[in-house]
Image: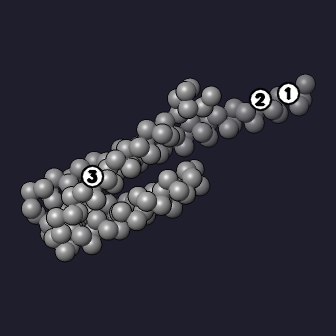
Amino acid sequence: MTRVCISIGILLMLVGLGTFSGIWVNNRCSDMVGQIDEVQELQEAGDFRAAACKAEKLERSWEEFRKFSSVLIKNNKLADADRISERIYHLSCAEDPGCIAETAEMRLMVDSLRRNELPLLTSIF
């Protein structure tokens, strides 16, 4: 009976940690999608200086997220978004129109991460 109780305790702990990490990833990715939308709006308006400032904040947010999420999410899902987050700032500083496409791609990747890490019954079983 002791083994059964310990096993149930471990199982409940794993489900709790999985749910907490899924909710954490969802909240952080939703915040970053909002930041990406702000950068994209500024880029489309032609205000590349303000977009570069917001992109720098986005890059810092991504680095902070990446530090903790690399434990929870496979590295290959994070690598492309990591590369793009660095390019968005540099392209905005250079006032390159290609940064709009990079920002849109970053938004899709972060939104995909958010959707894939939601703790749903279909994603667990």
- Residue that appears at 52% across and 29% down: 120
**Can you identify the residue that label 2 sits on?**
8
Q: Secondary structure at mark 3?
A: helix
On the image, the x and y values in percent for residue 29 come to: 39, 47
On the image, the x and y values in percent for residue 83 come to: 40, 65
On the image, the x and y values in percent for residue 86 come to: 35, 68
Q: Quadrant of the C terminus?
A: top right
The answer for how far apart the CA atoms under marks 3 and 1 are is 49 Å
Query: Which label is found at residue 4?
Result: 1
Asked where in the image residue 87 lies, by quadrant, the reply is bottom left
Asked where in the image residue 60 lies, by quadrant, the reply is bottom left
Check contact, mark 2 vs mark 3: CB within 8 A: no
Q: Left or right: 24 with respect to 55?
A: right
Check contact, mark 1 vs mark 2: CB within 8 A: yes
> Nearest the camera: 20 or 125?
125
Can see residue 39?
no
Amino acid under label 1?
Answer: Val
Amino acid under label 3?
Answer: Ala
